[in-house]
Image (cartoon, rainbow, N blue to C red):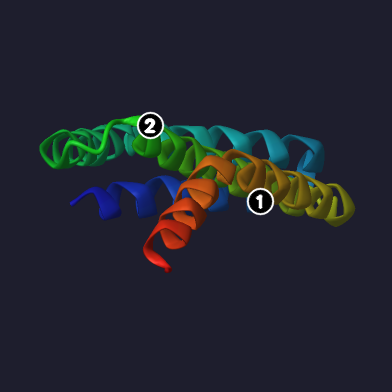
Amino acid sequence: MDIVKIIGVGLTALIVIIILKQYKPEFAVYVSIIAGVIILVMMMDKLAAVVNLLTNLTNKTGTGNAFLKILLKITGVAILTEFAVSICKDAGETAIASKIDLGGKIIIISISIPIITALLELIINILP
């Protein structure tokens, strides 16, 4: 039950943050970052299993790994962006959080251009 471990780390971090905010509020952000990193590390095995499954499916279809690599990059950018945005919001910096969010969205769009192009070419080829 990985979710129990995740909840345990999250609730432990929450209790530490609540206590720290009373005495040393500047350290609360550090605890939040450390808890987030611990949770991400705990999920690496699950993420690796998903990547392996997708790689095996892609190899069976014979479509090549190009689209899979793009999708994995997009997913990575989304996860890292959400992580950074959450940390900024925890620190009370919503303006920076919104800029990071916008930057992540723009990067995702730029990474996805080859997929969009391939889909449009496929549609053009299908249409008479």
The residue lying furthest to the bottom in this view is: 128
| Helix, strand or loop at mark 2 | helix
Mark on residue 38? none
Residue 80 pos. (x, y %): 57, 39
Q: Amino acid at mark 2?
A: Ala
- Residue hosting label 2: 66
Residue 9 pos. (x, y %): 41, 45
Left or right: residue 104 versus residue 96 is left
**Front label number (2 vs 1):** 2
- Density class for disc 2 (Cα within 10 Å; few <14, some 14-19, many ≥20) is few
Q: CA distance from mark 2 to mark 1?
A: 30 Å
Name the foreground residue: 33 vs 57: 57
The residue lying furthest to the right in this view is: 95
Name the foreground residue: 56 vs 1: 56
| Helix, strand or loop at mark 1 | helix
Q: Amino acid at mark 1?
A: Ser
At x 38% / y 39%, what residue is drawn?
Answer: 67
> Pointers 2 and 1 in contact (CB under 8 A)?
no
Task: Report whether residue 28 is seen.
Answer: yes
Answer with mark 2 or mark 1, whichever residue precedes in sequence.
Answer: 2
At x 21% / y 39%, what residue is drawn?
Answer: 58
- Residue hosting label 1: 86
Q: Quadrant of residue 38?
A: top left
Q: Quadrant of the C terminus?
A: bottom left
At x 18% / y 52%, what residue is drawn?
Answer: 1
Residue 90 pos. (x, y %): 72, 52
